[in-house]
Image: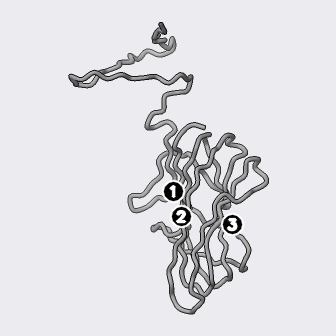
Amino acid sequence: MSKIAFTPNASGSGVLTVASPNTNSDYTLTLPESTSTVLTDGSQNYVSIFRLNTSVSPSSGGSQETLTAWEAVDSRGQGNKGTGVSQSSGVFSFANTGYYLITYNLFMTQHTVTYGGGVLQATLNDSSYSSILETYSSTSNTSGTYYKSASGSVIFDVTDTSNCKVKTNILASGTTIGFGGNTDVNYTHIVFQRVGDT
């Protein structure tokens, strides 16, 4: 028969109280066979949203370009939970290992191109990048103001915070297209949610 042991911290002076709920039912709490730290709401549960803060157009057609004008959401009641993800020049880094659900959303305006969208690339060695997500919208090659969107999701396994990173690219058949950005509204944006340990 296995045993349960509570080990106090010799440096602490607080009292740890385990309280049961007000119930007349029987419940069983099954502990995992693991030495991992118990995940609490404030420890490693991260949700980070970044948005393009100004509209941009590609400088050439048919070639990928990295979006760099990202900002963390910070207005109109919006915010990030924790500081699990940071970005620099369109490259996103992770503060903790784990599985991350990443959703890349693109909002496209004023286009006279045949297609436009985005490519999410990842590196496992902080050097060479490969595509892990591509999402596009076919568009009408006519003048005027049109709106299209493209979106896709991946689950990225961050096993090493120094080497595992992603970057956000755009790709369109021409330059006469805008990828919408705004400093208060989420048009083109990306969402990172840590969903579990690696």
Between marks 3 and 2, how big is the CA–CA gap? 14 Å
Q: Earlier in the sequence, mark 3 or mark 2?
A: 3
Amino acid type at mark 3: Thr
Q: Earlier in the sequence, mark 3 or mark 1?
A: 1
Residue in the picture at 60% in, 67% down: 135
Q: Residue furthest right?
A: 128
Residue topped by disc 3: 66
Q: Nearer the viewer, residue 177 or 31?
A: 31
Q: Identify the secondary structure beneath mark 1.
A: strand
| Tag 1–tag 2 contact (CB < 8 Å) | yes
Callout 1: 10 Å neighbours few (<14), some, many (20+)? many
Above or below residue 176? Residue 197 is: above
- 76 lies left or right of 94: left
Closer to us: 41 or 156: 156
List the residue tagged with mark 1. 49
The amino acid type of the residue labelled 2 equals: His
- Dot 1 or dot 2: first in sequence order is 1
Q: Quadrant of the C terminus?
A: top right
Name the residue tied to disc 2. 189
Which residue occupies 56% across, 45% down? 84
Provide residue 122's location: percent of width, then percent of height.
69, 54
Q: Quadrant of residue 168?
A: bottom right
Would you place residue 139 above or below residue 85 in this image?
below
Contact between marks 3 and 2 (CB within 8 A): the answer is: no
Q: Amino acid under label 1?
A: Ile
Q: Residue furthest front?
A: 1
